[in-house]
Amino acid sequence: MKNLTTKVLAITVLVIAFQSSFAQSKVKWTAPSSASSVKNPLAGNTSILKDAKVLYQSTCAPCHGEKGKGNGPAAASLNPKPADHSSAAVQGQTDGELFWKMSEGRNPMPAYKAILKDEQRWMLVNYLRTLKK
């Protein structure tokens, strides 16, 4: 009886996890309104783009792809799928919104505020702007 209870519990946990992941993939990811007015302290600084590209390639490209199209080598196994950084949907967000999303993360994307310094995340925001279609 104990084995049956354990199996039922394990199946229940898997079903809930799957449903949660599926539901999350259908929910639009929106930064709070307070994030939209946050100003980028590195806005217009093109001297950082070379370093930002290196950081992007090591941190973001595995999922988002080298050109930011959302087609990195890890993308196939992810749900929700990585965003296309060159898309109008991403490019239409403010720098503050992009910075907030990088900072906070959303499964499967990690919260980079614990991994990258503020300046590095702002560098990535500037680099994302170079990926416009």
Image (tube, rainbow, N blue to C red):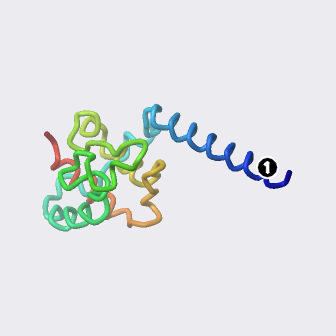
Q: Is residue 107 visible?
A: yes
In the displayed structure image, the side of residue 98 where residue 84 appears, left or right: left
Q: Quadrant of the C terminus?
A: top left
Of residue 118 and residue 77, the one placed in the foreground of this image is 77
Of residue 85 and residue 8, the one placed in the foreground of this image is 8
Q: Is residue 122 visible?
A: no
Within 10 Å of disc 1 (Cα), the crowding (few <14, some 14-19, many 20+) is: few
Residue 82 coordinates in the image, percent (x, y): 34, 46
Q: Looking at the image, how many numbered discs can be counted on the residues?
A: 1
Residue 17 coordinates in the image, percent (x, y): 59, 44
In the displayed structure image, the side of residue 113 where residue 131 appears, left or right: left
**Mark 1 residue element:** helix
Name the residue located 80 percent from the left edge and 49 percent from the top edge.
5
Residue that sits furthest to the right in the current view = 1
Splitting the image into 4 quarters, where does residue 34 fall?
A: top left
Residue 101 coordinates in the image, percent (x, y): 41, 48
In the displayed structure image, the side of residue 10 where residue 131 appears, left or right: left
Name the residue located 21 percent from the left edge and 67 percent from the top edge.
54
Which amino acid, by three-letter code, is at mark 1?
Answer: Leu
Q: Is residue 74 above or below residue 85?
A: below
Q: Is residue 125 above or below residue 113?
A: above
Residue 28 coordinates in the image, percent (x, y): 43, 33
Splitting the image into 4 quarters, where does residue 127 fall?
A: bottom left
Mark 1, residue position = 4
Q: Is residue 68 above or below residue 119?
A: above
Name the residue located 43 percent from the left edge and 40 percent from the top edge.
31
